[in-house]
Image (cartoon, rainbow, N blue to C red):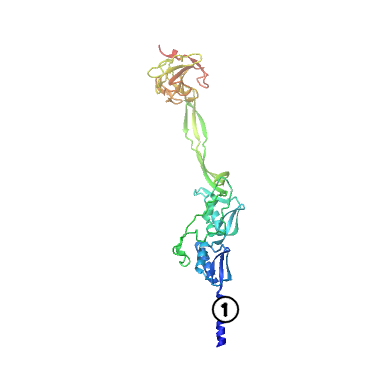
Amino acid sequence: MVAASISVVMLLGVYDYMSNYVYVVLLNDREVGIVDDVEEIEAFIAELADLCGDLYGMETEPGDEITMIKEFRPGSKPQPGTVRTAIRNELSFRAEAFMIKVDGIPLVPVRSEEALVMAINSLKQSYFSDDSRVKVVDAFIMEDLELEACLVNPEEVFSPEEVAALLMEDNEDQTLQTALLPASSDRGMFDSRKSNNDIAPEYLFGADLEIQTEEKPQLNISGVNVKTLEEATVVEEIPFSTETVYDEEMWIVQNEIKVPGQPGKKEIVYYITRENGVEIDRIKISEKITEEPVTQVEAIGTARVPSVGSGQFVWPVQGGGEVTPGRGFSSYHTGIDIHAATGTNILAADSGVVWFSGRGGSQGNYMILYHGSYWTLYLHNSVNLASKGTRVEQGEVIAKVGSTGRSTGPHLHFEVRLDDGSGEWHTYYQHTPVDPLRFFRP
């Protein structure tokens, strides 16, 4: 009995001695509490890692150093709840990812190699056209893209869509700068993440735990350069040619379109090279005529313009109008200026044929009429009403008074020139000017 009692006492002593040994839990060399069951804490950490992995769809591991050291601490009481709370609030996690490098410069991490391929395809797709006449033959990024394995906070991993958007950005500095946050963060794992309270059991995360969200950091980067090769089918117009025929029954100032011309059409296939959507080169690879042009046939008169003037004029401004003082006929002023309000009718002083109806620099809108042995000129009109080759009768309205060209105000500059015997007008000073007033009836 005595021996048995001694054995019991010894066992109790050993148990009491051993119960004074506990495990000190250190988080990044800082003590957060003591426990007596290492496996319980390890299971808790593993469960947190699984939960984090479920949240982000990635395998995760602790990003902080957790150590549990066995120490002899008589009278100390294990605090597993306190340790779990500290770990839950302060432990960060990291995931295996791939850092995208652009010409050797780190950009952002992605989950996998497939994510980068998806981002590149999305980027290329933005340069594709819905136009059925344009087909993108090839598209490629001009910079060198590579991947490097890394460990990062799961929140720092970018989706393919986010990467594509970043690669398309274009900033003024034209430099790439890494935006990666430190992988070893002193934030707790659940301080900033996608909100999903239902995924966490209450014994791990209290019902009153507030789970916040945080946007990814704004990056200061510039986009990559994308070169595309397009095959574009373009419909272009083929100009029509003009064939001239001569008609002896028409006056030399007359012409007529006998057959209207029609442009043709052709389909041209180009290879177009673009950088970031801007065309830098174009090569024609084929051409096919789809519609032949129709040649325009224009008849030009060869007959001499008839002499139809009487030699006696009517006043060329309807309603009268006086010659502006100092602006009568002289050696330096080859006509007379008749003052009249803008829009007043201008009349053909004699019967004749319109040789010219158009616009000159100093003359403004003007007309030239052929009467046979002489010519009449009407300058500075607001508008011409008779066209070239038209026969007009004496007193017919052919234009309106204006102040176009080199003019100091609304008036008609009227001239008469004697024909030089050619019956044709080639240059402005070809025919001799005479005083118009001598042609009017007394």
Q: Is residue 296 above or below residue 426?
A: below
Q: Secondary structure at mark 1?
A: helix
Which is more toward the observer, 55 or 186?
186
Q: Residue furthest top?
A: 442
Quadrant of the snapshot with the N terminus: bottom right
Which is more toward the observer, 21 or 49?
21
Quadrant of the snapshot with the C terminus: top left
Which is more toward the observer, 87 or 310?
87
Q: Is residue 44 above or below residue 234?
A: below
Q: Tell me which residue sits at (50%, 65%) in the image.
A: 85
Q: Position of residue 275 (x, y in %)?
A: 57, 46
Q: Residue furthest right?
A: 104
Tell me if residue 48 can be seen. Answer: yes
Exactly how many numbered labels are in the figure?
Answer: 1
Q: Position of residue 187 (x, y in %)?
A: 53, 59
Residue identified by numbered label 1? 14
**Which amino acid does the dot numbered 1 rest on?**
Val
Q: Residue furthest left?
A: 319
Tell me if residue 251 can be seen. Answer: no
Q: Position of residue 94 (x, y in %)?
A: 55, 61
Q: Residues within 10 Å of mark 1 (few under 14, many from 20)?
A: few
**Left or right of 4, for residue 344:** left
Q: Is residue 322 above or below residue 216?
A: above
Q: Is residue 250 above or below residue 149?
A: above
Q: Position of residue 36 (x, y in %)?
A: 54, 72
